[in-house]
Image: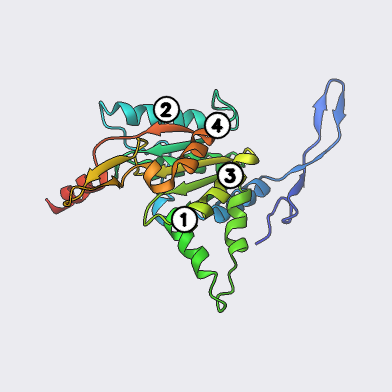
Amino acid sequence: MACAHCGDTGWRLAQASAHGEGTLPAAVVRCECDETRRLSELLDAAQIPKRYQHCTLENFDLPAGARELILAHRLAATYARDFPGALADRDRTGLLLFGNVGVGKTHLAVAIAQHLLERGFACRFADYRALLKQIQASYDPANPATEQGIVAPLLSAEVLVLDDLGVGRSTEWAQETLHYLLNHRYSHKLATILTTNLEDAEPRTARMSDGGEYSAPGTLAQALGERLRSRLYEMCVFVAMHGRDFRRETAAAVVR
């Protein structure tokens, strides 16, 4: 049904108003339905999975005494409110949320995006592992999707949320693909919000049964390589998020 005020044109006639001794003539102004339509289009384009569409800054779980989570939430709220000028270091326009599983990193990243969408910024959500699989599938001649068609929206989004960075087996191809995406966004000063279960630490070595050593997994440097790790330092403010695994605790409570 067409808007009763503007007939879906996006513009409506404002009423004339008194001004001093005279009357200001009626003016054409943006209709409220245009803002609603714009927000709906932004939400659709953001491709936030249904599982996370409920995530807001207001319903983020903040247990008493969880200092890192409280600080992370405070930074996220400031970032979402003041974007694009929220960070003191203007060269680092993004955030990297890292910590153990189940503490709410994805919730907080999506909550920032939801708030920015309401403010009219174009955001895009992508799962790291799913993204790599989509790109690989595009190499099949029978697949109508193309690598450029998959990557282009992520290159140009005002704000990109890249979830679960470093999940899965790290390959040279995966690292090059990620570097291309992140380097483009860095060069164009586009904000990128990333989440990862990997720790920001120097590569650890572990000893094998035969006495040899190998680099143990679990760090950004090991999964992404030092070049990408360095680029992330230039792009993002690193935000530690460690705490209890809320997903495990919720599941245990249901069983009881």
Instruction: Tell us which disc is closer to us: 2 or 3.
Output: 3
Between the residue at mark 2 and the residue at mark 3, the CA separation in whole angstroms equals: 28 Å
What residue did someone put label 3 on? Answer: 183
237 or 247, which lies in front? Answer: 237
Residue bearing the label numbered 4: 92
- Which numbered disc, 1 or 4, marks the residue that appears first in the sequence? 4
CA–CA distance in space, label 1 to label 3: 16 Å
Could you tell me if the residues under marks 2 and 3 are in contact, i.e. CB atoms within 8 Å? no
Of the numbered discs 4 and 3, the one sitting upstream in the chain is 4
Which residue lies under the disc numbered 2?
74
Task: Give the amino acid at mark 2.
Answer: Arg
- Which amino acid type corresponds to the residue marked 4 in the rendered image? Arg
Foreground mark, 4 or 2? 4
Secondary structure of the residue carrying numbered label 1: helix
- How much space separates mark 4 and mark 2, taking CA atoms? 18 Å
Relative horizontal placement of residue 108, taking residue 66 as reference (left or right) = right
- Report the amino acid beneath label 3: Asn
Residue at numbered disc 1: 172
